[in-house]
Image (cartoon, rainbow, N blue to C red):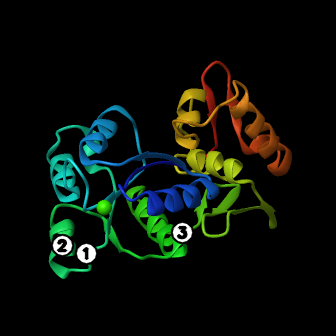
Amino acid sequence: MMRVLLVEDDELIGNAVKQALNDAGSAVNWVQDGISALASINTEEYALVLLDLGLPKKDGLQVLQELRQNQSQQSSLPVIVITARDSIEDRIKGLDLGADDYLVKPFSIDELHARIRAVVRRNNGVANPIISNSIMQLNPATGDVIRDEQSFSLSAKEFALLQALMLRPGNIFSRDSLEESIYGWNEEVASNAIEFIIHALRKKLGKDSIKNVRGMGWMVIK
Ligand code: CA
């Protein structure tokens, strides 16, 4: 699906969220304090940050404030605040500081997925939950893709890769950028992993579903 930074100092919640996102095909980098969060945001590209508020070293609200004041393009990175504090005051503060949404603990994994889908959609300027180009429709809620009125189910990685391409149809993606958008830090990536996934996608969806731009990478048409 995409690369997510998870900032959470609670081991149990952190493990559960990371696992759930990995299962859904997202690459997750998990840090456990506010200073590591800012350092990671400054060195890696993320599609989304899940930010706990009560954090060691630097509070989540402070992290959010510094992120939004940052002059780089990372300052507009979507942030979903995760908070155990069910106080209206904290939520308002978070939203005022530029959080895109929030989740109050304990939350269900389904709710987490739904919020992430909504925030990523908004951030990509895609109002319709179905991501489509002129030949295919991808449904993030079901993980299915439809082509020529036929529905195909995809593996998590296949879905993640196709979604990365389809959110920016017409753009060419290099192997490195595709690897970055679907694998996390600690995941072993075989040198031909991307080619392997693309081969599988083409087999299901047709050779022309993903174009190979020689020497540069891959793209889907608009
Ligand atoms: Ca915490």
Q: Quadrant of residue 173?
A: top right
User: Where's residue 27, x and y in %?
Assistant: 54, 46
Label 2 or label 3, whichever lies nearer to me, is 2
Amino acid type shown at disc 3: Pro
Q: Residue furthest front?
A: 11
| Residue linked to disc 3 | 129
Q: Check disc 3: other Cα within 10 Å, few if <14, some if 14-19, many if 20+.
A: some
| Point 26% across, 56% down: residue | 55
Q: Quadrant of residue 125?
A: bottom left
User: Where's residue 160, x and y in %?
Assistant: 62, 50
Does 32 sit left or right of 157 as displayed?
left
User: Where's residue 57, x and y in %?
Assistant: 20, 47
Say what secondary structure mark 3 lies in.
Answer: loop
Q: CA distance from mark 2 to mark 3?
A: 29 Å
Seen in the picture, residue 52 relative to 215 is either above or below; the reply is: below
| Residue linked to disc 2 | 90
- Residue 85's tag is 1
User: Where's residue 222, x and y in %?
Assistant: 59, 48
Q: Does the residue tagged 2 have its C-beta within 8 Å of any atom of ligand 1?
A: no
Does 134 sit left or right of 174 as displayed?
right
Labelled pair 2, 1 in contact (Cβ < 8 Å): yes
Amino acid type shown at disc 2: Asp
Seen in the picture, residue 180 relative to 64 is either above or below; the reply is: above
